[in-house]
Every structure is written in structure tokens, then in C-alpha cells.
Amino acid sequence: MSVRTIATTPYQDQRPGTSGLRKKVPVFQQPNYAENFIQSVFDVLEGFAGKTLIVGGDGRFYNREVIQKLIKMAIANGFGRIMVGQGGILSTPAASNMIRQYKAFGGVVLSASHNPGGEHGDFGIKFNVANGGPAPEKITEAIYARSKVISEYRIFDTADIDIDTIGTKKIGDAEVVIFDPVADYAALMEKLFDFDAIRAMIKGGFTLRFDAMHAVTGPYAKEILEHRLGAPEGSVVNFVPLPDFGGHHPDPNLVYARDLYDLMMSDKAPDFGAASDGDGDRNLIIGRGIFVTPSDSLAILAANAHLVPAYKDGIKGIARSMPTSAAADRVAEKLGIGMYETPTGWKFFGNLLDADKVTICGEESSGTSSNHVREKDGLWAVLLWLNILAVRKESVKAIVEGHWAKFGRNYYTRHDYEEVDADIAQKLVTDLRARLASLPGSTVNGLRITKADDFAYHDPIDHSVSEHQGVRIYFEGGGRVVLRLSGTGTSGATIRIYIERFEADQSRHNLDTQETLAALIEAAEQIAEVKKRSRRSGPSVIT
Ligand code: VG1
Ligand code: CO
């Protein structure tokens, strides 16, 4: 058994996007494709000799193969301890917790998150740093630069490692530890929340359904919701992680979690419905007869967090990604705490959390979390909701409508145009940027534009600048349209249009979202011509 150095030729397309490197499985299956990227990660890092690396994935197709490569390469590159989730399973928030809890140098999560899996689906690799959060742009860009010139990688020559049996083995100079991926995470959740109160609520007849979408949260939700909190068996559905997610898209939204939505709108609905995504960092929250938009959920959780043990002394501040609605802003204002607007992607929250500027963060794409880890956390959001429900003893609907009555309502929707020709999408954005300066003062579809820009983020902690993070167009009366290209897709381009409008008048809080936003949606089309240029009759997905 020895370290082997293998010659390789670089690929030119290994630029990490919003959350790691994501490509189709056949792309990852090209010779040395995964090895090149992993070695590029190790090549740009310093000071990890003898240190701990956390490893796991969401169980999708090709997970087990890449985990083997990764362990052997980590040994060869000098890590002292490689801790692997049993069976190669580890949710993104649990990985973040493990990195922090075991003071690891970092971690590698193999996941393409909400993207479809299977042989022809997507695969992904992301690297997290010592604070438990996604590597910042400075590092991901360095990895990309390295991947374009890499000429060799190092791998430890050994038979495949048994990743299914819990225990520790010495391999070469390193220790390989196979651990239960659920235990430490579940213990953390018990520390943050009042499990007794939630258990009592469930015992009292409160019903719930959690859809794990055959992705990574199944074992976590089974243990926490059914075993520890006493939800009857069957409350957690689709709980076995499958390499192809049962043929479904593990994206917890109204399109891909349709069964759950339909159930929650029916007369058989339980009190509470929730789902998570491929790697367990997203959450979908639906009350009986009411879908809670992620932007509203962030605002409501922030406004009620003081009701649960972990946040009983109040929260320091809130951060939200720029396209997320401004609902949380009014909560921050009322609480007299800081509010931060960051680019899309969890990596931008890390500095604010580390500097203790914010306690709760969220994104419109169903991501919410707090300072307990440095990733978004699907089950955490579910448990925070449950804990709040147990304290307030009101329905989800009553809490949401009460929130609107107090703070006003931000009508919000996102329209995605998927798999658009990349050149068409690029030109559309370039043309739009060129027109930004001339937009303010003009009227489109009867709506007057007050401001338009291309969002640039100045990190208040490390002062780094991230430009071109999305076009923002503001309208008189509080409307806003945002347009940006997705950084997680793997074929063509995905254009995302985010539309919102504030409504203070309580008598107008129960209108249809798409109808209420129709004038803004049409204005967005007239300005950006997404339908026209992509030759589509409408969005592929509306959330
Ligand atoms: C999307 C979401 C973004 C999220 C990212 C990763 O990115 O919009 O809010 O952070 O996915 O989430 P994009 O660039 O496609 O818009 V996950 O759960 O896929 O890691
Ligand atoms: Co995810």
C-alpha cells in the first residue's frame, strides 16, 4: 500500500457555481474528472496535514464511487483523520455541524442538492471550510484556476474501504472513521428546541407529514420526528434515500412536492406538512390549507424565534439573499436589529454569522437556518416551526395571517425558465444590463420605474466585492422585479425572475398571488423579453 501519483490532463469546465461543482453524471464519469477536481481543492488549501476531513453525500447515483476516490485521495494528500457518514450518507447541515463539532479542517459533501439524480441525472461536489460553511468565492475561484492547469493527482493505493460498518480503521498514516450520520445532528436539535413541548403537542393530537423525497433527510426525519418526538409511524414518507430519488426531482416546491401540497389543501390534511431536498438543506412548509412562501417563513421564524430555547434572548440580526422578499426587513425593523442583503448562495452568510451580526438567515429558494451551523438546514426549519406551533397553540394559517395583519404582506413569486439556450440567455442579460441606466423614470405597462441596478455586494466583514449578482428593477408603490441566471443548473441556462409587491391593507391579504402580480410580471416581460427571446409561452416552473 502506497501513495501513487497519477498523471492527468485538466478539464476547462470545473468552475464551481452557486453551491459547488455540478455536472451531469456522465461528465463526472469521464476519466479523472472527479479526481482532478478533488486534487484541485486539496492543492489550493494549506495547513491540513494531520487534520480532520468530514466526508459524506446525499446518496445519489455515483456517490459511493466518488467517496472511495475521495477517502483514498485525502489519505494520500496527508489528512490525519477522514470521518465518513455511514453508507456515504450525510446531509449538508449535518456535515456543517460535524465540521464544527469535531473542529475539522473542512468537509466535502457530494451532492447536486435539488437537482435530479440517477445515471443520467446530476452529480456534484462542494467543499466546506473550517467554520462549517461553503468555501467562499476566493477559494472556489482558486480551485477553478487550479483545475485548468492540474497535471497530476495523488491517491492512496488500497482496496475499497468498507463505509457501511461503523468504526475506526488505520489506513496508511490516516484514521478512517465511519460514523452514524444522524446521531450528533439529532443531539444538536434536541439542544436547540423544546422537544418536550413538541412531543406533548403531538401526543395531544397534532398531526404532521414530512416528505423526505427519497433523499438524504429520510433517516434524520425518521429518528427525530417519529422516534424522538413521537409522531406516529407513517408521518415521514419516502424516507429511504435512493440513488435516483425514486425517479423524482428532490426539490421541495409546489411542482415537485405536488402530492404533499394536494394533501395539505384537501380535507384529509394533517396540521402540518413539510419536505426537504436532496441534501437536506431546504425546507418546504405547508399548513393545513396554506402554503407558506419561504420568504414569509423566514420573516415569521425571525419574529417568533424568541419563543424557543435556542433564541430565547432574541436574535442579533437577519440576513436574506437579495432576491428574497423584503418581508423579513420589516421584522428586523420592528425588532430594532440589523438586516443584511447578500447575493444568492449560502456562502455569503458565513462572515455575518461568524461575526455575530446575524442569527437567522434565509433565501427565497426554501433555505433557512441560524448560527447553529453554517449551512441552510431543512429539518431545523421544520423543528423551529413545530416548536413555535407548540408554544403558540395556533394553526399555521392563523400564525401566517396574523403576521400579515401585523407586518403587511409581500406577495411573491418566482418564475423559472429552464434549459434556455445559453447564448440567448447571456445576450438577454447583457442587453438588459445595458438598458439599466435608462430605465428609471420610464413607465412600463403602466408602472413607473424608480430605480434599476445590477446588484453588487460589499461584504461588510472582509470587504470583498461580488458583482453582477442580479438585475433589480424597483417600481413606484413598492413593486420589485429581479432577474438573474441560475448557478446550479447543468444544461443550458436557467433564467430566474423574482417578482414581489408589498400590500399593507389587510382586506387585500387573501388575493391570488399570480393575479396580484400580473401587472409586474407583464412589465418584466416587456423589459427583459424572456418569453419572446426564449420562445416559450411561459415559465417552466412557478414557485
Ligand atoms: C439555487 C437557489 C439558491 C441556493 C442554491 C443552492 O441557486 O436559487 O438560493 O442557495 O440553489 O441550493 P441558483 O444559482 O440556481 O439560483 V441547494 O439546496 O441546490 O444547495
Ligand atoms: Co440543497
Image (spheres, rainbow, N blue to C red):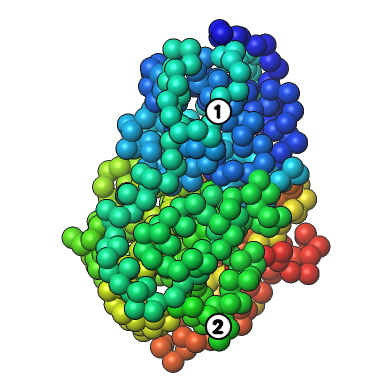
Q: Is residue 343 above or below residue 254?
A: above
Percent position of residue 86, x then y: 50, 37
**Left or right of 188 on screen, residue 529:** right
Identified by mark 1, the residue type is Asp
Q: Residue at x 75, y 36 (%)?
A: 26
Percent position of residue 404, x then y: 39, 80
Q: Of 400 and 246, which appears nearest the observer? A: 246
Percent position of residue 228, x then y: 36, 59
Q: Which residue is mark 1?
A: 162
| Mark 2 residue element | loop
Give the quadrant of residue 298.
bottom left
Percent position of residue 353, x then y: 32, 47
Q: Of 216 and 333, which appears nearest the observer? A: 216
Quadrant of the rendering where the C terminus is positioned: bottom right
Q: Residue at x 37, y 73 (%)?
A: 202
Image marks 2 and 1: residues in contact by CB distance under 8 Å: no
Quadrant of the rendering where the N terminus is positioned: top right
Q: Is residue 390 above or below residue 178?
A: below
Q: Mark 2 vs mark 1: give the one in front.
A: 1
Q: Of 12 and 40, which appears nearest the observer? A: 40
Judge the density around disc 2: few (<14), some (14-19), many (≥20) Cα neighbours within 10 Å: few
Marks 2 and 1 sit apart, C-alpha to C-alpha, by 45 Å
Q: Is residue 480 visible?
A: no
